[in-house]
Image: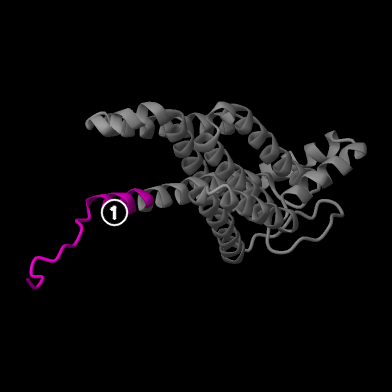
Amino acid sequence: MHNLVEESADLSAVVLGLFAAISLLAHRHDRWAAGFRRRWLGVLLIIAAAVVLVQVSEEVLGQESTAIDRSILLAIHAAVPAGLLPLFNAATQSGSSHVLVPAVAVAVLLLLWRRHRFEALQLATVTAVAGVVVYVAKTAVGRARPDLWSTQWFWGSSFPSGHTLSTAAVATAACLAVARLRPSIRVPAMVLAVVWVALVGVSRLVLGVHWPTDVVAAACAGLLVATGVNGVLTFIAHRTRRTAGTALPTTSTDSPR
C-alpha cells in the first residue's frame, strides 16, 4: 500500500511538472496563451493519460503489476453479487465491435446528412485507428488473460482491453463533436461518456477477462487516440482553409486584343 501511495505521488508530480512547463511555454505566445486558458483542463487530462499509460505499460511489460492485479481482481470477484452479472454483460456488449461499429456507422451517416463533415470524418477515423491500435498492441505484448475463475472466451491477448480502449476513443470523439456542435450540453455529454467508459472497463474486471492494468492503460490510450486524431484533423483543416483563403485568382494578362 505504501508503494502504491508513493508511486501515485511521483506520477502526480510528473504530471503537474509537465503541465507547468507547457503552461509557461504557451504563455510566451499570445495566441497559444488564449487557447491554453480555454483548454487547460483538457491539456492536463491528456498529460495525465500519457504519463499513466507509459507507467502502466512499463510495469506490465516488466511484469511488476501481477501481484496487485491479482489482488484487485479477486477482491472485485468477491464483492460483486451474481445478480449484477447481466448488467455488466450488457455493459461489455455495448463496448464490443458488434455494437460500436454499427452505432458509429449510423452516427457518421447522420452527421453527413446534417453536413457536419469534419465530425463525421473524425468519428470514423477515431474508430478505425482505435481498432488498429488494439490489434497491434495485443499482438505485440501477448499478455495472458486472467484464469482465476471460469470465464467467457474473448479474442486476443489481455493487454490492453480492446473493449475499453475503443469505448474510450469513441466516447471522447463524441464529446469533442458535441462540444463543437452543441456546447450547451457538453457537460452532460462528458458525464455520460465517463459513466459509459467506466461501466465497460469495470465489466471487463467483473467478468474476469482482463487485469486492472489492462483497463487503465486502455482508457488512457483511447483518450489519447481520440485527441490525437482530433488534433491532426484540425491542423489539416486549418491549413486547408488558410491555403484556400490565400490563393490568388488566376487572370489572363496576355489575352488577344
Q: Position of residue 35 (x, y in %)?
A: 35, 32
Q: Is residue 218 visible?
A: no
200 shown above or below 112? above
Membership of 250 in magenta stretch = yes
Q: Is residue 137 left or right of residue 31?
A: right
Q: Relative to 67, is 20 above or below?
A: above
- Front residue of this view, candidates 44 and 10: 44
Q: Is residue 35 visible?
A: yes
Query: Which residue is most to the bottom?
Result: 256
Look at the image and give the residue range highlighted in magenta: 237-257
Dot 1 falls on a residue whose secondary structure is helix
Q: Report the quarter where the C terminus lies.
A: bottom left
Q: Is residue 10 magenta?
A: no
| Camera-nearest residue between 16 and 112 | 112
* Residue drawn at (19%, 56%) of the image: 248
Looking at the image, which residue is at 28% across and 49% down?
242
Q: Where residue 149 appears, x then y in whole percent?
A: 85, 51
How many numbered badges does the structure rendering display?
1
Q: Residue at x 57, y 30 (%)?
A: 186
Colouring: one colour
Query: As rendered, which of 8 and 165 lies closer to the eye?
Result: 165
Q: Where's residue 178, x and y in %?
A: 56, 37
**Image quadrant where one finds the N terminus:** top right
Residue 124 at x, y percent in the picture: 57, 56
The residue labelled by disc 1 is 244
Identity, as a three-letter code, of the amino acid under mark 1:
Ala
How crowded pointer 1 is (Cα within 10 Å; few <14, some 14-19, many 20+) is rated as: few
Image-quadrant location for residue 203: top right
Q: Residue furthest right?
A: 83
